[in-house]
Amino acid sequence: MATEPEHASAANLLNQWRAAERDSAAAESSAKDAARVVTAASAAEEAAKKSDTASSESLDAAGRAKKAAGKAVKAARTATEIAADEKERADEAVTTTEEAEAETRERFHAAQERGFQKAPDEPQSPSLEPNPEGG
């Protein structure tokens, strides 16, 4: 039979062994938790990198869009100026043609009042108004 000190020593060793098992299980659990934390942190780092890249690309795209909008504003301003010049020319053409129309209308009415008499070098053609002499 084992003596008392041996028995105490065996019980002590068994308690130490069981404590070591518990510590080992806790350490394994902590290691698994740490591995999950490392995985999550790695994923967060990757997401942050992608976010940084996307932000940079967004800033670049916004810069290009701003430049394009500036060019569109300049083009629209130029088109407006050209259209204003064209309108001015068209208004001048309207004025000129209205004046020509008024002048030819007055000449027509004057000729009508004279009975559409022809100049000596113009060929005779039937008149649009009846001749007061019945002809």
Image (cartoon, rainbow, N blue to C red):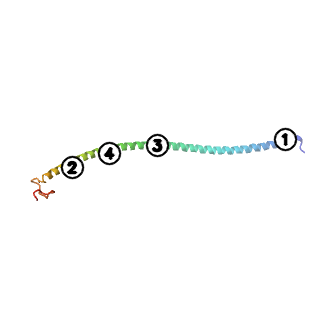
The residue type indicated by label 3 comes to: Ala
The residue type indicated by label 1 comes to: Ser
Q: Secondary structure at mark 4?
A: helix
Identify the mark nearer the N-term, 1 or 4. Answer: 1
Using the numbered discs, state the Cα–Cα distance from disc 2 to disc 1 in whole angstroms: 132 Å
Judging by the rendered image, the residue that carries numbered circle 2 is: 101
Using the numbered discs, state the Cα–Cα distance from disc 1 to disc 4 in whole angstroms: 107 Å
Identify the mark nearer the N-term, 4 or 2. Answer: 4
Identify the mark nearer the N-term, 3 or 1. Answer: 1
Q: Position of residue 48 (x, y in %)?
A: 56, 43
Task: Check if mark 3's residue and mark 2's residue have beta carbons within 8 Å.
Answer: no
- Does 29 sit left or right of 4 as displayed? left
- Does 46 sit left or right of 132 as displayed? right
Using the numbered discs, state the Cα–Cα distance from disc 4 to disc 3 in whole angstroms: 31 Å
Give the label, 4 or 3, closer to the camera.
4
The residue type indicated by label 2 comes to: Glu
Give the label, 2 or 1, closer to the camera.
2
